Amino acid sequence: MKAYRNLLLIVAIVVLGGCASYTTPGGGVHLSKLADADINELMSKEPAAPFPANISVARVQAPGYQSYRVNSFGTGRYSVVTTRDVETESDFIKLSMLPEVSKVAPLNRILLPTNLDSVRSLREASARLKADILLVYTFDTSFHAGEQKFAPLNVISLGFLKNKDITVTTTVSAAFFDVRTEYLFGISEATARERKSASVWSTSDAVDDLRVATEKAAFQDLLPEIEKTWAGILAQYADAGAQ
């Protein structure tokens, strides 16, 4: 009887070990959909931000976003991720060193309302920080195993991916909004891709390491694009205001 119980235990361990799984992270947000949908009102908006400018920063994702390591905050049309598992402090230092930037301040949960239905919620939180411009960004990460694509929040059984190449692709998009008027100053975007054999998918930690590496690479590629966008904003608005 004891030998039989031990056999059952061994079988259970093997089965459970072979059924390791990974849940793909939630989706990104179409940043253009955060603004007011009325075309006439959008066209009538004008910038009011002074330069040098204080910039607030927020990472937004799809409602109910979660990844292997982080969860999001808020309900509504989008959510906000306040935990940094991809961005580093040096990344924000780089942003603060852009010309005509006084300071950069990430938004945190204390300033945010629970219900998030438009960019106005982020603008109001930014106003409490005395920010002039809001920088919003979002990650859209997809997973492919061979020809199969996994949608956000899909559960992947790792044991069934042998002999397949795994591709993780991340596109990160960013937009600059005027805190006072919601005027859209400009957008930036970058994409990174990592490819590994299925052997790296032996554990959920290994899978998520690949996700983090891809998102970090995309964010690093985004920073110079943000610099270009910011240079264009200064040329059109800061220089014009100084005349």
Image (spheres, rainbow, N blue to C red):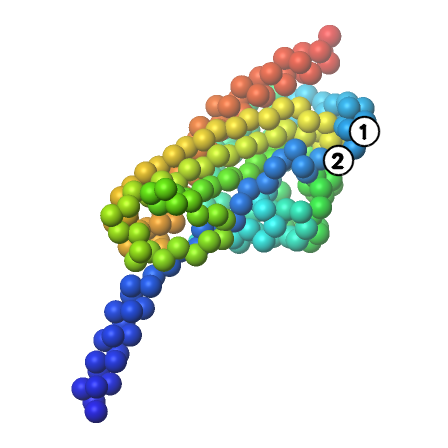
What crowding class fits label 1: few (fewer than 14 Cα within 10 Å), some (14-19), or many (20 or more)?
A: few
Res 69 visible: no
Asked if disc 1 and disc 2 are in contact, CB closer than 8 Å, the reply is: yes
The correct choice, above or below, for 16 with respect to 83 in the image is: below
Q: Residue furthest front?
A: 147
The correct choice, above or below, for 204 with respect to 228 in the image is: below
Q: Where in the figure is residue 143, as x and y percent of width and height?
A: 41, 44
Q: Where in the figure is residue 159, as x and y percent of width and height?
A: 30, 58
Q: Secondary structure at mark 1?
A: helix
The correct choice, above or below, for 55 with respect to 153 in the image is: above
The quadrant of the image that shows the N terminus is bottom left
Q: Residue at x 53, y 22 (%)?
A: 227
Q: Secondary structure at mark 2?
A: loop
Q: Residue at x 29, y 69 (%)?
A: 15
The residue nearer to you, when weighing 206 against 157, is 157
Q: Where in the figure is residue 18, as x and y percent of width and height?
A: 29, 63
Q: Where on the picture, by quarter, is residue 118?
A: top right
Q: Which residue is mark 2?
A: 36
What crowding class fits label 2: few (fewer than 14 Cα within 10 Å), some (14-19), or many (20 or more)?
A: some
Q: Residue furthest left?
A: 3
Indicate left or right for 5 with 120 as reference: left
Indicate left or right for 205 with 56 as reference: left
Q: Which residue is mark 1?
A: 41
Instruction: Give the amino acid at mark 1.
Output: Glu
Q: Where in the figure is residue 221, as x and y percent of width and height?
A: 44, 28
Instruction: Give the amino acid at mark 2.
Output: Asp
Q: How many marks?
A: 2
The residue nearer to you, when weighing 201 against 218, is 201
Q: Residue at x 68, y 38 (%)?
A: 34
